[in-house]
Amino acid sequence: MLVLFIHGMGRSPVSGWPLLRKLKRAGFLTATFGYFVSQETVSQIVERLVAKLRALLAIEDLVLIGHSLGGVLLRHALGMLGETRHRVHHLFLLGSPVTPSRLAVRLSGNWIFRAVTQDCGQLLASPARMLAIAPSEVPTTGIAGTRGFTGGGLFGTEPNDGVVTVSEVSAPWLQNQVLVPVMHTLLPSSATVAEAILKELGCA
């Protein structure tokens, strides 16, 4: 079985290496998918991602791991795969919003944010576009960080990872949700997250 990791916005495939090393040691094949939010629209990224998934699924069953925006892109792509998606063994969403991101909504009018994040940033801030992404139809585990500040500000007293609240990454269609004391950026490199994934896959 092959594990495909997709990084979050502003990161690169390198961010998943600590996690992928642990999965390799457990016997999994691994691969990554990269994208550039400043150069590609959501549609362009998803089109490439669907092609990548179809090529991989032709030879291997998959486990998918998406960090933040990477998880949103994976859900978007899975909705376009048709029956082939049933060869996806499990989907892991690491701090990946399933509703509009409160932070993205706050920043959506900022010209710097718009210039850097382009269409992907606007996707995360749009209720209509986020709701148009169908719930996952493959077994899905959400992993939510809780190491963010809860003394006020944008998130108030809600548990959060510094970028998204637990409520923003929660949905009734998740088969399981794991809370970890980890900040958003560090989710892919966290040993606690790796242990949770391996446990779900029956390897720990």
Image (cartoon, helix red, strand yellow):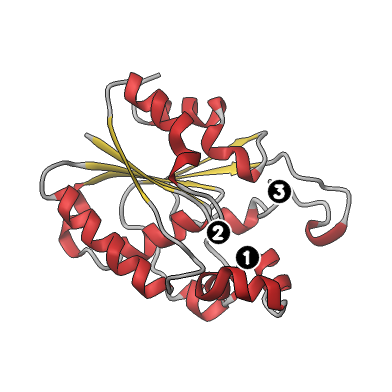
- Which amino acid does the dot numbered 2 rest on? Pro
Q: Identify which residue is drawn at 32% across, 63% down.
A: 77
Q: Neighbour class for label 1 at 10 Å: few (<14), some, many (≥20)?
A: many
Quadrant holding the N terminus: top left
- Which amino acid does the dot numbered 1 rest on? Ser
Q: Give the CA separation, mark 1 to mark 2.
A: 6 Å
Q: Point out the tag, 3 or 2, that comes first from the N-terminus.
A: 2
Label ID, residue 1: none
Spot occupied by residue 128 in the image (x, y as percentages of width and height): 52, 80
- Which amino acid does the dot numbered 3 rest on? Asn
- The secondary structure type at the circle numbered 1 is loop
Label ID, residue 101: 1
Q: Give the CA separation, mark 1 to mark 3.
A: 12 Å
- The secondary structure type at the circle numbered 3 is loop
Which is nearer the eye, 168 or 125? 125
Note whether 100 is above or below 195 in the view shown: below
Q: Identify which residue is drawn at 41% across, 61% down.
A: 73
Q: Give the CA separation, mark 3 to mark 2.
A: 12 Å
Note whether 106 is above or below 153 in the view shown: below
Spot occupied by residue 33 in the image (x, y as percentages of width and height): 35, 51
Spot occupied by residue 113 in the image (x, y as percentages of width and height): 66, 71
**1 and 2 marks in contact (CB < 8 Å):** yes
Residue labelled with disc 2 = 97
Residue labelled with disc 3 = 160
Can you name the residue that lies furthest to the left here? 58
In the rendered view, does 52 fall on the left or right side of 101? left
Q: Identify which residue is drawn at 53% across, 53% down.
A: 68
Note whether 111 is above or below 121 in the view shown: below
Quarter-of-image position of residue 2 = top left
